[in-house]
Image (tube, rainbow, N blue to C red):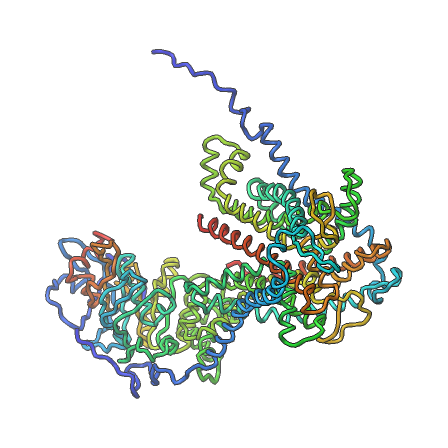
Amino acid sequence: MAAVSTPAAPAGLRRSRGGERSLVSLAFLVVLWLSLFFSFVFLAILVITTFIEGLPRLDVRLFTNYTSAFAERAGARAAILGSLMVVGFCALLAVPLGVAAAIHLEEFADRHRWYNRLFELNIQNLAAVPSIIYGILTLGVLALLGVKNKNIVAGGALALALLILPVIIITAREALRAVPNDIREASLALGATEWQTVWRQTLPAAIPGIATGTIIALSRAIGEAAPLLVLGGLVFVTYDPNGLLSGFTTMPIQIYNWAGLPQADFKVVASAAIILLLAILLAMNGLAIYIRNRYQRRW
Amino acid sequence: MMGRTSMAQSDRTIHVGQTSAARTAESAENGLGRVDGRRLVESRLSPQQELAAEPVAVMECRSLNVYYGSSHAVQDVTLPFAQNEITALIGPSGCGKSTVLRCLNRMNDLVPEARVEGEVTFRGENIYASDVDPIEVRRRVGMVFQKPNPFPKSIYDNVAYGPRVTGMKVDDMDELVEKALRGAALWDEVKDKLHQNAYSLSGGQQQRLCIARTIAVEPDVILMDEPCSALDPIATARIEDLMQQLRERYTLVVVTHNMQQAARVSDRTAFLTARPDETTGNRTGVLVEFDTTAKIFSNPSEKATEDYITGRFG
Amino acid sequence: MNVTTTSTAGEGAKGPHPGHVSSLRSANPRYGERIIRAILAAAAAVSILTTVGIVVSLLTPAVEFFTDVSIVEFFTGTRWAPTFADPSFGVLPLVTATFWTTVVALAVAVPFGLGAAMYLSEYASEGVRRILKPVLEILAGIPTVVYGFFALQFVIPYVLRGWLGLDVGTFSALGAGLVMGVMIIPTVASLSEDAMSAVPMSMRQGSFALGANRMQTTVRVVVPAAMSGIIAAIVLGISRAVGETMIVAIASGQQPVILRDPLEAGQTMTGFIASAALGDSRVGSLEYNTLFAVGLLLFAMTLVVNLVSVRLVRRFREAY
């Protein structure tokens, strides 16, 4: 019987040229890791430098004083209250409107009609329109309503509401879509009407998702300045906002103003205000994540 | 509660409302039909059951045709559903039995491309007439689905949901909930935890909860779309026993792909099959045979039925 | 078999269960339900109204603008000085600044964003991804005014001038663009990662079975398969870069000049709109209308870019 010779094994199975451990492969992995790392390093540097610069002025004055020509007296009181008020009214306007629109599009509208697909395209586009354009839109709307002084809380709330409306519609739709169809069918089979089904089953089940999306949208609204600048962006506000027709300023606008001033001390106050703003945003996003983890049902 | 007996031991007589032509003495004695020497599926009926000679149909479909877009899903089905009886719809997959079932409570309205032609009558009224409100139909014709689908609420709220949304006048909701849960043979298991979430129940319990929820609105007819296919055999047995109890008060129409279940449980059976269209290749559901369960399973008139029952196809 | 049918009208049914006596024809026209549905439809219509509103509010003053200024001058003129005594309305300086900041931003966002996406999609374990993805999202959540301030305070003086030794002034399109790029990384990364994750596992397994390693599989199999999604991500990044206001308003420059290289400072389209709004031109005047003309141009540019992106996203979603 002829001996069967095994051909010489090529370079061994352990160390091959193009394997996972090859130099090029490892270099690639390192490059990828670095690109991820870069983002985090940037974030860290941003937070740390801002913190270091702003810490001296993170004090009571920030909360109690109005802005001033003198840096050591400047505070963000009007801005803080203005932000809260404008975003509050914005939420009152955008959330019911957005959720109602989402309910219509998701539960009642016939998905196959051409105009409903146009709706979807339209909303996707609106979500990507530059925020400053919403300021211009609000100028137009207010002019139509005959409002002379456009730099009012109502105007700011309207601009921000229009800005985040598409985002709320999109996230609310996703939350509604995630509710399984079984539940709707069961409700309808019992003799409930479509609205009863939505109001009593679908919507309650979708609320955690809607809440999460809304909070994230509102946190974006708090950080926006561009649309409000277009409205007039009064930056020297030394009074508390006191109603829908009141003048106002917000934290991003105030920061923008201080950032543009030459005195170094104003840069410190600006940094302090930034720390405050970031803290508020952290709290809001933390809340959203908490709601999502605690209440989100995994169907 | 009826016990389960093995096939070999069954020894019951079948009372049939009408005589049929070719019935051997052997099959009348032990409920087993023999055709071509092959044993057919056992038909197990309790001795108390007597099928009415003149059944009263509470629902009927006449020349029912269903289209999904351009595809002809169901063709010319005419079936009566007799009061206080269990009617089974059997057939291979794709034969349209679920489609027919969903026409009975207008659930096909929810499918945008679905088109229904023909008549479906409830106590003589065509439920597809233009001025009929589908909501009213669904309050009288309830449905239990294949996969148990309780609401993400408490057991109590699941049962109370139907009466609440349909505006039933209820003096004592607690009493109504208890009655419904008893009617679904679930009360003893959940009476101490009515306010727990329905998802904490087992699959079989959830399905019985869905049944309780359905009977809470006091329908006349209960439709069941393969109610046991997602359940284990023990849960299945309990639901089958429950069906026998339910038929005293309601009329049941059950779709099942399990022939033995149809034979065990139903009074009358309709066999549907899917006929392919020569030109398009699409399959259309047609009614092949409809008769008492005893006859279908012991001595069917159509060869197609016999082929299906004996497992030659499908 | 003979079957009789019970009738509904007026009689109770036979048998132990009484059943409903009333007709199926509902006496209840359910007005409440109809009103609610109308309200919901109206809410959805607001979104269309918004788009219409945007177009109208931009178009009306812009059209007025173009009756005074020729389109040719607008698009080809090289001097942008709308408020001067001797005004000039060539929009090119603004466009060059927007161009440079966008290019720089993409030069940062695309490599780093794609790299992050590749790592998260192909290499990272589930646990790692669950931690890293949210951190990446944090970058997206930082207000742009904070980014702008950081660009002005830190990136331009310390990174560009100090560390890299470049010859830049207080403001610089490069500085603004770099920071803007980091802001866009999450957009590019997240959409690219979605696209890459959507590539079926079977494709990767086919590649591994042939003896390819992970790098080769990622680069030669996954990325090409996910290409339309990746391009959609980049295109969306372009849209955000073009439309971004605060970063460039703070750090890119206040003077509209034709930018020949990104190291210089120049005002972008969005920067101009922001500063023009803060000025006090008379409503209806030519100066006032320039704001809308530039706004219209901006909207048109981002609209085209967005539509392309939506098209691409739909294509990659359908592919799998």
Taking B74 as reference, is C276 left or right?
A: right
Residue farthest toward the front in the current orientation of the protein: C86
Residue farthest toward the left in the current orientation of the protein: B21
Residue A197: x and y in percent read: 47, 72
Q: Nearer the viewer, residue A89 or C97?
A: C97
Residue B97 picture quarter: bottom left
In the picture shown, does residue C170 fall above or below A214?
Answer: above
Residue C120: x and y in percent read: 59, 44
In the picture shown, does residue B291 fall above or below C234?
Answer: below
Residue A41 in sight? yes
Residue B130: x and y in percent read: 32, 78
Q: Which quarter of the rendering shows the N terminus of chain B?
A: bottom left
Residue B48 in sight? no
Q: Nearer the viewer, residue B296 or B1?
A: B296
Tag count: 0
Residue B222: x and y in percent read: 34, 72
Taking C252 as reference, is C43 left or right?
A: left
In the picture shown, does residue B22 fall above or below C238?
Answer: below
Residue at position x 48%, y 38% in the image:
C204
Residue farthest toward the top in the current orientation of the protein: A2
Residue at position x 15%, y 58% in the image:
B303
Taking B126 as reference, is C258 left or right?
A: right
Q: Nearer the viewer, residue C103 or A279?
A: C103
Residue at position x 35%, y 64% in the image:
B113
Q: Nearer the viewer, residue C294 or A263?
A: C294
